[in-house]
Image (cartoon, rainbow, N blue to C red):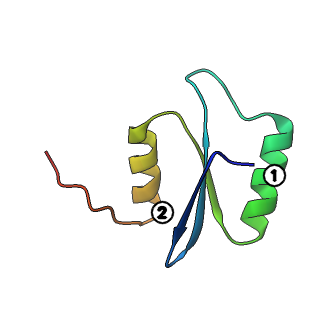
Amino acid sequence: FPDLVVVTYRGCLFFEVKAEGQYARPEQKAIHERIRNMGHRVAVVRSVEDVRETLREWSFPTNEVAP
């Protein structure tokens, strides 16, 4: 099951956290696909910047203030 689950007013977001150079195992990919088939979003991320980028791609605003 993904490492992080974020509940939003637009549904649940799931994040699988992996170290650089590591990838989701086949059984993790199968679970990710099942979650997607239920209408949720799933992403594999390796950094906070990956999360930010994914949220932008999914059109989810953040409350972060630009530096």
Residue at 32% across / 61% down in the picture? 62
Q: Mark 2 or mark 1: which is in front?
A: 1
Residue at 68% across / 48% down in the picture? 2
Most distant residue in the top direction? 21
Q: What is the quadrant of the C terminus in the image?
A: top left
Residue at 41% across / 66% down in the picture? 60
To which quarter of the image does residue 47 belong?
A: top left
Q: As displayed, is residue 55 above or below residue 21?
A: below
Circle 2: element type: loop
Disc marking residue 31: 1
User: Horizontally, is 54 left or right of 3 in the view?
Assistant: left
Disc marking residue 15: none
- Label 1 crowd bin: few (<14), some (14–19), many (20+), radius 10 Å: some
> Residue 1: percent from the left, percent from the top?
75, 49
Residue pointed to by mark 2: 58
User: Horizontally, is 60 left or right of 66 in the view?
Assistant: right
Indicate the amino acid at tag 2: Trp
Nearer the N terminus, badge 2 or badge 1? 1
Q: Are discs 2 and 1 less than 8 Å apart at CB?
A: no
Most distant residue in the bottom direction? 9
Q: As displayed, is residue 49 above or below residue 62?
A: above
Residue at 70% across / 72% down in the picture? 39
> Residue 49: percent from the left, percent from the top?
38, 40
To which quarter of the image does residue 44 belong?
A: top right
- Label 2 crowd bin: few (<14), some (14–19), many (20+), radius 10 Å: few
> Residue 55: percent from the left, percent from the top?
44, 57
CA–CA distance between discs 2 and 1? 20 Å
Q: How many marks?
A: 2
Indicate the amino acid at tag 1: Ile
> Residue 30: percent from the left, percent from the top?
84, 49
Circle 1: element type: helix
